[in-house]
């Protein structure tokens, strides 16, 4: 290293020492810019996750409505009566076959 190189290095260091507030502001601005980028990325990721959850909720809601309709169809009184008569051979008792149970 020559003497001129050492003088240049010390001049740079001395200039940086004098301009430390500007250097500090530059670092803070860069850090702030990175924080904005990170926050925007995080907000987009959370919005995407929210949209997926809302879509899943809607799918579950549709499935629930279909299940309610199916339950109503399967438990319809006339259907249950027809199945009891057909599959189990059940029917209405004759008036002489009816038994009344009285509670004490």
Image (cartoon, rainbow, N blue to C red):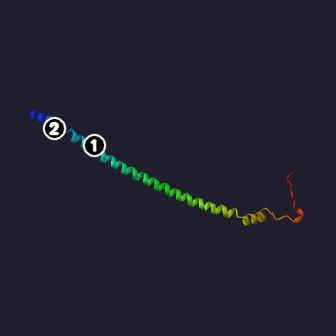
Position in image of residue 75 (x %, y %): 70, 62
**Label at residue 5:** none
Residue found 28% across the figure and 45% down from its top: 30
| Residue that carries the numbered disc 1 in the rendered image | 28
- Look at the numbered disc 2 and give the secondary structure of its residue: helix
**Label at residue 15:** 2
Q: Is residue 36 left or right of residue 66?
A: left
Q: Is residue 76 left or right of residue 41?
A: right
- Look at the numbered disc 1 and give the secondary structure of its residue: helix
Position in image of residue 42 (x %, y %): 39, 49
Position in image of residue 102 (x %, y %): 86, 55
Q: Which residue is more in the foreground, 102 or 72?
A: 102
Neighbor class of circle 2 (other Cα within 10 Å; few <14, some 14-19, many 20+) is few
Position in image of residue 19 (x %, y %): 18, 39
As drawn, 32 above or below 56: above
**First-in-chain label (2 vs 1):** 2
Q: Is residue 15 left or right of residue 54?
A: left
Q: Quadrant of the N terminus?
A: top left
As drawn, 103 above or below 28: below
């Amino acid at each position: 290293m020559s003497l001129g190189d050492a003088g240049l290095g010390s001049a740079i260091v001395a200039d940086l020492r004098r301009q430390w507030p500007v250097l500090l502001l530059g670092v803070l601005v860069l850090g702030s810019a990175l924080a904005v980028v990170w926050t925007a990325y995080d907000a987009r990721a959370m919005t995407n996750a929210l949209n997926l959850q809302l879509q899943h909720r809607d799918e579950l809601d549709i499935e629930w409505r279909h299940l309610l309709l199916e339950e109503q169809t399967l438990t319809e009184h006339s259907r249950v009566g027809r199945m009891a008569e057909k599959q189990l051979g059940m029917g209405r008792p004759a008036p002489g076959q009816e038994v009344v149970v009285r509670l004490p």
